Amino acid sequence: MAIYLEMPQLADDFPFRILLNDGNILTTPHWHREIEIIYVTEGTINLGINDRPYTLRAGELVLINGGDIHYVLPSPGSERIVFQFDLAFFVKLDTDNVNLQEVFHHVEPFSPLWGKEQEATIRALLEECYQEEQRKSIGYQFQIKGKLLVLLVHILRELPKKSVTQKSQLTMQNQDILEKLDKIFCYVEDHYKQKIMLSEVASLVGYSDFYFTKFFKKNTGKTFITFLNDYRIDKAKWLLINSTANVSEIISQIGIENDKTFYRWFRHSMGMSPLMYRKKMITKDNNEQNPH
């Protein structure tokens, strides 16, 4: 699978959508023309934008410009809200001839570098957009459009710019890095049920074990073993919620050979045992279906 173009289905008169993601999905390298803002509400996530890895914690955000190639690693125990909107709609309203695409290209994308006050302001605007979208009260689209305009003005006026060293375009070398990561991610997706040796994945991208270990850590923020175990834990979580298989059966389906290793990783990731997690999620689902 090569780096692909994602085409969100956004209405012309309301080019905006919100996605809630629980961290159970590996998002392989892709790009789209829309602006994307990721807001982590729980846990920690690791992602990459072009040639730069980021670690985001609860309460932090990142801005992704249209055309930026990005990916998100599996992040057990995390939750994030993804906001996507098309700048073309707002360009129609602009009488100052501001190049909004350029604004997003030059602004610092990582919220911990904005300062606490700016981060809190952007976070509050996004939370208000989320609440409006959830309630869908009369006039909610007007409210969201208004808040997005305030958001754009704040980004334009208040957020710091990237340092000169961060403004590199996506070079051939960076493209090669992203292609290699994509190949690794797809290999894990296809073979996670089997035993995966680090050496076989290293050879897949033409590296020695030693160089591959450094390459993966540098470009994702995680070791390959941690990434692989997180991916398998996320598959186990899905099976715990969506199947009646017992824990031993689930372990046999996700490529972990040792039960103790699975229990240790699961508790480390989720803070509870697999059966406690299953009970918690079933109870939560029942409560949502029967609120009274």
Image: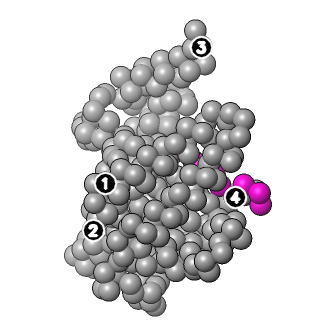
Q: Nearer the viewer, residue 144 or 243?
A: 144
Q: In the depicted view, which residue is nearer to us: 253 or 210?
A: 210
Asked whether, in this view, residue 64 is left or right of residue 18, the answer is left
For the residues labelled 4 and 3, the Cα–Cα distance comes to 33 Å
Query: Image point 47% across, 70% down: which residue?
Result: 156
From the image, tell me which residue sits under label 3: 290
Residue highlighted by disc 2: 217
Residue tagged 1 = 117
Instruction: Tell me the element at label 2.
Output: helix
- Quote the CA–CA distance across marks 2 and 4: 36 Å
From mark 2 to mark 3, how far is it between C-alphas? 45 Å
The disc, 1 or 2, on the residue closer to the chain's N-terminal end is 1
**Residue type marked 4:** Pro
Above or below, 186 relative to 79: below
Dot 2: few (<14), some (14–19), or many (≥20) neighbours within 10 Å? Answer: some
Answer with mark 3 or mark 1, whichever residue precedes in sequence: 1
Residue 208 percent coordinates (x, y): 28, 79
Residue 258 x/y as whole percent:
29, 41
Q: Looking at the rendering, in which quadrant would you find the C terminus? A: top right
> What is the span of residues highlighted in magenta in the rendered image?
12-20
Amino acid type, mark 3: Asn
SS of the residue under disc 3 = loop
Q: Earlier in the sequence, mark 2 or mark 4?
A: 4
Label 1 secondary element: helix
Q: Looking at the image, which residue sits at the far front?
A: 95
Residues under numbered marks 1 and 4 in contact, where contact means CB atoms less than 8 Å apart: no
For the residues bearing labels 1 and 2, Cβ distance under 8 angstroms: no
Choose top left, top right, bottom left or bottom right for residue 1. Answer: bottom right
Residue for point 62% across, 60% down: 85
Residue located at (31% from left, 54% from top): 117
- Of the numbered discs 1 and 4, the one sitting upstream in the chain is 4
Task: From the image, state whether disc 2 or disc 4 is nearer to you.
Answer: 4
